[in-house]
Image: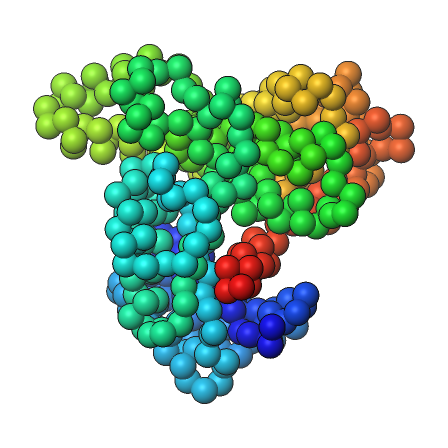
Amino acid sequence: MSSLPILVLNSGSSSIKFSVYEAGDGERTKLFEGAVDGIGTDLGKLWIKDATGKKLVDETPAVPTRAVAFKMVADALHSGDFPIPAAIGHRTVCGGPTITENQRITPELIDEIESYSALAPLHTPIAVFIMREALKLFPGVPNFAVLDTYFHRTLPEVAKQMPIPAEYVAMGVRRYGYHGISYESIIHQLEPNVPEKLIVAHLGNGASISAIRNGKCLDTSMALTPTSGIISGSRTGDIDPGIVIFILKKIAETTPNALEAADKLETVVSKKSGLLGVSELSNDMRDLRDAINAGNAKARLAVDKFTWTIARWIGSYVAELNGLDMLVFTGGIGENDIAARAEICAGLGALGIVVDPTRNNVRGEAVISADNSPVKVRVIPPAEDLIIVNHVVRLLG
């Protein structure tokens, strides 16, 4: 295959991140990356930098809408200063029960993904919009959906099946799992020496954890939606369903319309809970650490809830794997919060997890386990864009 420039798109609620790789036979070289930030404000920012970190574009335009933001990206890539992409890969959180394979995007595929927006309501509507815009603004360029759920397609039925009536199972209610591109990137970086029994904790504003056997997903904390599993920035994680019913009934007292009440409930469990809900301060771990240092008891409780929950999941996954060879921390908190890693592992010595405080005093890639630790503990930053490029190249044939 001749060398091709591949554009990777990863869109969020207030930003569009992108990167371009040059992909040849077995070679992947990042050419540049960039983002449009501050969508919906007059304080927008468009920046592009090369692989060395040199700023190539640094502008502060008004970015009133996502359409304006993406047109800025398209205009920059068509300016002649950068190679026009030969293919585009879209990070796609969930395709629903009918779309389980990474594949080329068509208008029909976009409609199908959109029909399951309720499974990832914070992500899918945005991704669907960008897909449609990409087909218009890059005519003739093949676009591909690369799914976060793809890695979790190996989940056994006992993990996928939910204990609910069959009529809802038939509607697609099951465990899908998320952050799969991140997990796949960790396996890619560990190859060819992927441990048989592996746990990876992807810890960021959204947090999840997966049990992996021989490179394949055995179990994962997120289920039907990214709200489930571990407490995260503003999401509840797993809670007693009776709590959800209680909150919904309280909302219904002043909101008789069922759909409106459900939307309000979704806001509670996805945007007002988690670290933010417990601390009543912030969903950002850095803010909470500052508050803890200032003596804030609610911030301390929120962080303790976070690390306690993750330790419990690790323990259950060690049982599920029948042992453990390696524990990997990844994601923004996993890579950078030294205290969180220490707090999570502090009580896991009986499981063979012993962290060396000196080795742990680092941000970024490292082995942080002690020499006498039966389980190796590592910090590995994810390489999600690289995995998306690899899938695009594979699908191009």
Q: Quadrant of residue 248 in the image?
A: top left
The mark tally for this picture is 0
Residue 293 or residue 32, whichever sits in front: 32
Residue 328 in the image: x percent, y percent?
69, 38
Residue 110 in the image: x percent, y percent?
30, 53
Q: Residue furthest top?
A: 242
Left or right of 371, for residue 134: left
Q: Residue at x 27, y 20 (%)?
A: 167
Residue 327 in the image: x percent, y percent?
71, 33
Can residue 121 be seen in the rendering of this structure?
yes
Residue 94 in the image: x percent, y percent?
40, 43
Left or right of 370, for residue 4: left
Q: Residue at x 46, y 61 (%)?
A: 89
Can residue 60 be seen in the rendering of this structure?
no
Q: What color scheme is it?
A: rainbow
Q: Residue at x 22, y 29 (%)?
A: 262
Left or right of 336, for residue 356: right
Q: Quadrant of the N terminus?
A: bottom right
Q: Residue furthest bottom?
A: 80
Residue 328 or residue 102, whichever sits in front: 102
Q: Residue at x 29, y 70 (%)?
A: 136
Q: Quadrant of residue 291 in the image?
A: top right
Residue 262 or residue 290, whichever sits in front: 262
Q: Is residue 51 above or below residue 262?
A: below
Q: Is residue 82 above or below residue 307?
A: below
Q: Residue furthest right?
A: 371
Q: Residue furthest front?
A: 397
